[in-house]
Structures are given as C-alpha cells and as structure tokens.
C-alpha cells in the first residue's frame, strides 16, 4: 500500500491539496475521507471540485447524504457521518454509487469502506494541535493507483513536511 503524509496550515492550503489531487482522478474512482468533525474533509472536497472545474459551491451534504456535481468528471459527494451501521448504507442504496461513473468522495467512509471498490484512495485528516495545521495522510490500494501514484506524489510534494 502506497502512503504519503502531508501537512497544511490553512483551509485554503487544504483546498489546494484537493485541487492537486483532482489531476490524478479518473471516472469511477472512490475516495474515502476520514477525520473528526471540523478536520477539513469538506474543505478538501471543495478543492477537488475546483480541480474538476465544478462551478457549483460544494457544501456539506450532511443533511442530504449525497450531492452530485457535473464537472470535467461527474462527482458524487457523500457524507455518511450520521450513519452508524453498514445496513443503513445498504438500505439507502448508497453502495450502488460505487459502481458507476461518478468520482465518489465519501466523508466518514469507515462505515461503508467494506462496500466500496477495492481500488480506492483513503485520506485521513487530523487536527495537528491547537493551530490551523492539519495532518493529511493519503494512502492508495489497488492496481488502478499503481501507475498513478508517482504522479500523485509529485503533485502533492509542496505539502510534504520539509518541502
Ligand atoms: P469536516 O468536513 O471534516 O467536518 P470542514 O471542512 O467542514 O470539516 O471544516 C473544517 C473547518 O476548519 C473549516 O471551518 C475550515 O475553515 C477550518 N480550517 C482551519 N484550518 C484548516 C486546514 N488546515 N485545513 C482544513 N480546514 C481548516
Ligand atoms: Mg464535512
């Protein structure tokens, strides 16, 4: 499993990380975002949307669960924060999202991780301390990421600690 550790010092920097990541995304990709409330998951998705030329404002889908956007690629932004059991996800039919053309961006994906495609990107955000710093760990599983990993790593270098 490929793994990469980043750090940002502002919400805008986290959006830039999303923007840089968007260049590596393909149709049908699944991206899982984990981290406590306020860690910056939605903020990062806003950057991905910017990178995919999505003009609509991206807001938290917490009360709708799923929002879809059209950009360079179609995007489905899902927040399963309020769902506690895998069965809730199945009941809502959300697992079918992972089989389509949409780039699937799932906040709080732990709960549905087992329902998602084996090929996926996982992004873990943590509040580093009392400041605005965020630690962002990106990891990939599956063949479809093997040939993209080097490019992704280069694109994200500016946010590597020590860069
Ligand atoms: P989540 O979706 O994980 O609950 P949000 O992205 O909605 O989190 O909120 C993150 C909040 O933290 C926003 O108010 C954002 O402005 C703020 N923030 C401060 N520093 C950062 C940072 N480095 N990265 C992301 N968000 C940050
Ligand atoms: Mg959110």
Image (spheres, rainbow, N blue to C red):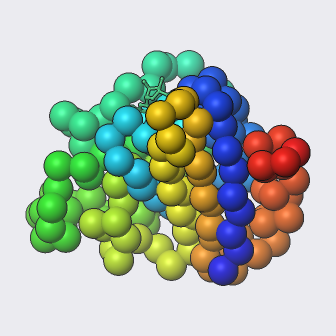
Q: Quadrant of the C terminus?
A: top right
Q: Quick check: 46 left or right of 12?
A: left
Instruction: Give the x, y percent position of residue 23.
Output: 75, 45
Q: Quick check: 89 left or right of 49?
A: left
The image quadrant that residue 60 belongs to is top left
From the viewer's perspective, is residue 108 above or below residue 99?
Answer: above
Q: Nearer the viewer, residue 15 or 117?
A: 15
Q: Quick check: 104 left or right of 109?
A: right
Instruction: Give the x, y percent position of residue 18.
Output: 64, 39
From the viewer's perspective, is residue 85 above or below residue 44?
Answer: below
Number of numbered markers:
0
Instruction: Give the x, y percent position of residue 143.
Output: 69, 80
From the viewer's perspective, is residue 62 above or below residue 79?
Answer: above
Residue at the image position 34 percent from the left and 74 percent from the top = 115
Residue at the image position 66 percent from the left and 37 percent from the top = 8
Q: Is residue 130 visible?
A: yes
Residue at the image position 79 percent from the left and 65 percent from the top = 148
Q: Quadrant of the N terminus?
A: bottom right
Q: Residue furthest front?
A: 130
Q: Nearer the viewer, residue 5 or 121?
A: 5
Instruction: Give the x, y percent position of residue 68.
Output: 40, 37
Q: Nearer the viewer, residue 102 or 40?
A: 40
Q: Is residue 29 visible?
A: no
């Amino acid at each position: 499993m490929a793994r990469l550790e980043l750090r940002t010092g502002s919400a805008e920097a986290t959006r830039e990380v999303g923007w840089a990541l968007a260049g590596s995304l393909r149709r049908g990709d699944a991206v899982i975002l984990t981290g406590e409330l306020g860690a910056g998951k939605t903020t990062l998705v806003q950057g991905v949307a910017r990178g995919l030329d999505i003009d609509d404002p991206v807001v938290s889908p917490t009360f709708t669960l799923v929002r879809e956007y059209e950009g360079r690629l179609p995007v489905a932004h899902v927040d399963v924060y309020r769902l506690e059991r895998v069965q809730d996800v199945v009941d809502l039919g959300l697992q079918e999202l992972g089989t389509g053309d949409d780039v699937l961006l799932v906040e709080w994906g732990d709960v549905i991780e087992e329902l998602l495609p084996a090929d996926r990107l996982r992004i873990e955000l943590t509040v580093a301390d009392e400041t605005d710093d965020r630690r962002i760990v990106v990891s990939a599983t599956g063949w479809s990421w093997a040939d993209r990993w080097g490019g992704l790593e280069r694109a994200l270098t500016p946010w590597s600690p020590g860069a």
